[in-house]
Each structure stands twice: as C-alpha cells, then as structure tokens.
Image (cartoon, rainbow, N blue to C red):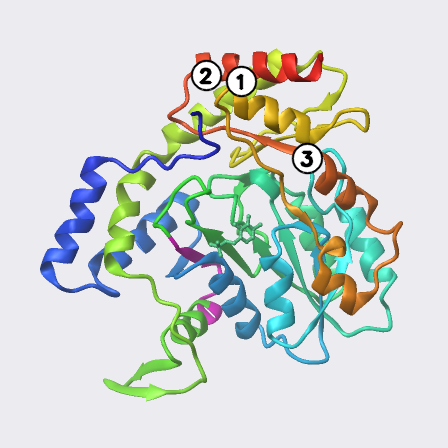
Amino acid sequence: MIKLASPDIRKEDIRKAVDVLLTGNLIQGENVTLFEQKLTAFTCLPYSIVVSSCTAALHLSLIALGVTKGDSVIVPAFTFPATANVVEVVGAEIILADVDKTTYTMTPESLETAISGNKDKSIKAVIIVHEFGFPAQMKAISEIAKQHDLRLIEDAACALGTVADGHHVGHFSDMACFSFHPRKAITTGEGGAVLTNSQTLAERIKSLRNHGIEGIAKKIEFTAAGLNYRMTDFQAALAIGQLGRFRLELSKRSELANKYIQLLQHEKSLQLPINSDGHSWQSFMVVLNEHTSRQFVIEKLAVNGIETSLGAHAINCLSYYLGKYQFKQDSFNNARLLYERGLVLPIYGKLAVSDIEYISRAVITALGR
Ligand SMILES: *Cc1c(COP(=O)(O)O)cnc(C)c1O
C-alpha cells in the first residue's frame, strides 16, 4: 500500500524521544527550547513558541490579538475547518473570502471583495492559509491588511518551508501558525508552533500557552487567563532530527511534484496544481473535471494499493456554518468546486520517482475508462 502521507521518523529520532522519557523531565525541557531555536534558525523569524497543535496556535494568536465577541475575521472559504473554528470559539464571526481555482488560496482581490462587501462589520483580522504549501501573495495581502488596519495571521499548518515573496512565510504578518500533525511534513504526533517578528506578541503567547504565567522579578505571577497548550519535551525531541533533514525533504517533494506534473500534464480531465517557486508541497491536489467520478478514481487507485484523499473543505458547505450563516447556494463557488472535485495524491520524501510513475499510470488508467 502506498500511503497518502508518511512521516520521516527514524530510529535516531525515536532514541532521542526515549532518552527524554528515561530522564523523567517530560514537559517544557531542553528539547522544546532547542526545537524553538531550530525553527527560528530555519525560518529566519526571531520568535518561536511551540504548542500542542496548530489549532492551539491559531486560538492563542486570536486571543493575543484581542479578537473577541463583536469582531469579525476574514478566512478563506476553502481550508481545514480549524481555521474558521478558532474564530467561532473566541466568540467572533467569520467572513468568508473565496479562493482562486488554480492556487486554492485567498488572493488580494478576493480579500478586497470580502472587505468591501462587509463594511457594516467590525473586521479585526484576516487569517490567510497557504493551502497545501502553496505560497499566498503575502506582500500584496499584507499591504491591504495595513490599509484597512487589520491584523494578519497566517495559517501555515501546511507551509513549513514555504517561501512567499522572497521570505519564509511569517515574515509579512503578525503571526504564523504551523502544524506538526502526522499529515504534515514534520511531525511530533500532535504539535504546532507560533512564529512571529513581534517580541510583545511572543511574550503574550508564551504566557497564554502556560496558564497565563509570567516570571516577574523572580516571582511567578498569573497575569492573564491562559490555557495549557504546551508541547511535551519528548515530542519536541522527535522533531529535531526531522527539521535537520528538512531541506532535503523539501527538494525531494519538489522533484516528485515535477514528476507528477510531467506525467499528468496531457490529461484533459484533470487540472494540475501550479508549480510555483517557494511551494513546499505538503500535498499534491489535482482537480477532476465534471465528467469524472471522483469516487470511481479513488476506488480504482485503492485497488492498485494507492491511498488518496479529498482535499480541504468548503466552509460554506459544512453543517455548522451553513446553519449559522445561511450561505447562498451560488456563493464561494471555487471553494465548493475544489471541495467536490479535489483529489490528493501521495507525496513525501520517502517515495521514489518510480512510485510517482506507478501512481500516475494508475491515475491515467482510471481516467481513461
Ligand atoms: C492541518 C491543518 C490545521 C490543523 O492542524 P492541527 O495541528 O491538527 O491542529 C489547521 N489548518 C490547516 C490549513 C491545516 O491543514
């Protein structure tokens, strides 16, 4: 079976985690600090706070910016539901912006449309998603956010290693949130991180991750109503080796994506993802045309031992959001289309070029029935 995703956890990574377990210092130890330092070095972003998931990272980011009841936050219509859920959890409301059909991300134009169509709302922030590792247009988007006095958060769950407008993601925003779930390119089981340029926000997030504790003049004070969103030290130990090998992982993913594109480019019944500079290829999602049954293709590939999956979700089609916001049937059509016709194929560093050839042949056969 060729799995959809497979983390590159090696014996030496496991040994590091076991060493931590043997010491008995299980939380917030030297491996958490080392992982944070290595994330800072890798991304060139000065502050890094690791947490228990990307959802926790997004939640803390909204709390740190003071987003609350009465506020609205713009989120892309096509994403993993966590992007929208955190907004609801802090009591704010979502405003959806449709995504581009070819890049799967929010564009400067769709952001402008969402802002100008909701002038009656108190819009506080935007959460931009680098869907599947594709770099959103951060420079233009950050300029729009500035113009309208909106805070900018990047949901970079899929985007460790993604470079947008010449900088690692996180450069143009207030905060970027990363995931280390097993479906992402580096994993700690569950895990996440907030990276930021702002010392003030970094300190706030650090305190909020740990019950609102601050060390003031060698005394511990509870200065905010915080949460416990810490990462354990043995989880961080698992990630350090993976991050050390991550440049190689990224170039391998890029090579495999190029191979898919070369082999599938003449298939008229599917649209390929755009091969942009700076793409980190967390997932490789194709879009099937309206004459092709996605279920048929998924089943054909499964028979050939190939695991596939649907892409992200259209928030406007999810029962909670549909019920609360009563979205019109013909709104956010690109998100709906990607939700209904997207198909994610396996991509990760442990696959060989010959695996991609095998998968591509199976896809072509399934399409040509
Ligand atoms: C995976 C993912 C998340 C959630 O990450 P967790 O670490 O599982 O909380 C959020 N947003 C996007 C875009 C994702 O792909």
| Labels 3 and 1: the sequence-earlier one | 3
- In the image: residue 150, left or right of residue 281: right
Residue denoted by label 2: 355
Q: Is mark 2 in CB contact (under 8 Å) with mark 1?
A: yes
Q: Position of residue 333 (x, y in %)?
A: 83, 45
Secondary structure category for the residue under label 2: helix
**What is the number of the mark on residue 342?**
3
Residue corresponding to mark 1? 359
**Residue type highlighted by circle 3:** Gly
What residue sits 23% from the left and 84% below the top?
218
Residue 178 vs 42, above or below: the answer is below
194 inside magenta stretch: yes
Measure the alpha-carbon separation of dots 3 and 1: 16 Å
Mark 1 Cα-neighbour bin, 10 Å: few <14, some 14–19, many ≥20: many
- Residue 100 x %, y %: 76, 40
Magenta residues, as a range?
Answer: 190-201
